Image (cartoon, helix red, strand yellow):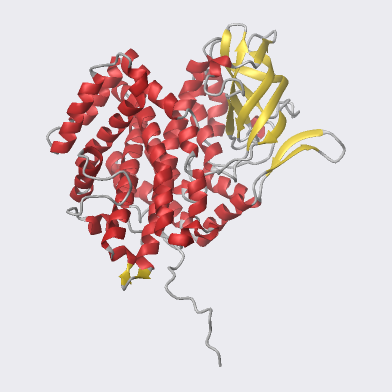
Amino acid sequence: MAGSTHTVTNQPPPLIGYDVYSADRALRAAVERHLDPELLDEVHGELAALGRACGSAQVQEWGVQANENPPRLHTHDRYGHRVDEVEFHPAWHRLLGKGVSAGLTAAWARPGGHVRRAAAFVLWTQVDAGNCCPLSMTHAAVPALRTDPDLATEWEPRLTSMVYDRELRPAHLKAGALFGMGMTEKQGGSDVRANTTSARPLPDGETYELTGHKWFCSAPMSDGFLVLAQAPGGLTCFLVPRVLEDGTANTFLLQRLKDKLGNRSNASGEVEFDRTWARRVGDEGRGVRTIIEMVEATRLDCVLGSAGLMRQAVAQAIHHCTHREAFGGKLVDKPLMRNVLADLALESEAATTLALRLAAAYDKDDEQERAFLRVAVPAAKYWITKRCTPLTTEAAECLGGNGYVEESGLPRLIRESPLNSIWEGAGNIQALDVVRALQREPQSLNAYLLEIGVSRGADHRLDAATKHLFTELADLDGIEGRARRLTERLALVLQGSLLVRYAPPEVADAFCASRLGGDSGTAFGTLPTSLDLAKMVDRSRPQA
């Protein structure tokens, strides 16, 4: 009798049925570091519940389903009437509902709201990054709307609600609302001042009719959108509701959905405005200044999202290598693979630590922290989002051919990984924003220097890197051509400073040796072998 040819051996079990939050020691430590101790029991319980959901087979399957069944655009009904609606798979609505109920749009309404939301965002990104887009923009719209107290009073309770209401109807009839954004146009891209969408004032002086085309409109089934258009007084910010107060649909003509590299579960569309009703937000001519508050908040979410993708990639790689045997032993115990895994874990922890520090600055909301954010957010957004793609690719390689197969989940992480670097201003925009803050707002540089100064003397490699940074900062003439180099250095020194203060000694030592001291190669897996690599891998091992 012939033997079986399909006995499955030496394959790791699925990474399911575990608490994604409690298994992430770096994330949990950051939450404990930055939150009021009186909130910790409540927040740990809240995040552990979300972590168990993230690690459950059911919720992970929702993420798969939402990506395998991308949204579909319906411009007209069967009779030829325009409907301009996007149809989503039921899994999308389950994900979005869970994200809203978990407080991912409620940071502004809760104590310690930004840190607890940031941690939740890192967790939820690991299930499906696509639904994090409307969650992010809804959260980020609040500070922009606060430039108009009347609009904030009307809309903020809806945006910070923990109730997901998917129906298209007047916002005042809904228990919760979501927001999208429409800034970029095909002729301008990041140069939003080149926008040509026009805004014609109506007699009341506060409402307008918009006419024009937006090249990227994120989350087009949202209840409202913040957009930019040219009013008589210059580029201005407007609120465009999807449904008007009388129940009629606002003119919101969806031309097509973008066929994107990743982020497949989420709809991004092109929209045409044709005498579309809008409410002005802020003063005419101050559109960029008004909407920049939203942009800053979504940039932080780019950092958080990349940190989440990194963490999931590292967890999958370590889990696989813990169970997989090759060449007479477990892969995780092989010196070279251990070096790769430790290096990936190091990058992930550095990203998480910096991301949560930025969220804590939002919670403190004092003058020094706001000044710190003006440099730290674009620097972190530049660097962490750029590290995401090489990390996820290397993590997939740890699984060998299995990592190139869709069922592993790694290809979805790889396709998602470039998005946060591109969204809300690509690398050059972030680097130029850093330079602009350094040149125009000396208090932002002072706040940054105070932050890294706390760790002075703790590590000689960090001190040397800081000294080199001072040399770079002393010469801001002709800085544009080296703005990326300076921004990278700002981010690395800041990460080193945080890890020296807060991470275990083996993590801080490895970071300063490899990222600041030059004792590594250009690829992952080139850490000095004198480091305690096994302890670093064990710290990042997900306990399923």
Rendering coords of residue 452 (x, y %): 22, 30
The quadrant where residue 183 appears: top right
The percent coordinates of residue 78 (x first, y second) are 85, 41
Q: Nearer the viewer, residue 16 or 257?
A: 257
The reply, left or right, for residue 106 in relation to residue 91 is: left
Taking 435 as reference, is 250 left or right? Answer: right
Judge from the rendering whether residue 158 lies leftward or rightward of residue 213; answer left or right.
left
Among the 4 quarters of the image, the one containing residue 208: top right
Residue at the (40%, 37%) spot, across then down: 386
- Out of 375 and 221, give the one closest to the viewer: 375
Q: Nearer the viewer, residue 177 or 395?
A: 395
Looking at the picture, does residue 353 appear above or below residue 20?
above
Residue 543 or residue 508, whichever sits in front: 508
* The N terminus lies in quadrant: bottom right
Residue at horizontal 26%, vertical 61%? 335
Residue 360 shows up from this direction: yes
User: Could you say which quadrant of the image residue 428 lies in?
Assistant: top left
The residue lying at 52 percent from left, 17 percent from top is 148
**Residue visible at 43% across and 44% down in the picture:** 389
Residue 117 visible in the current orientation: no
Can you give x and y, in whole percent of width and height, for residue 449 in the image? 23, 25
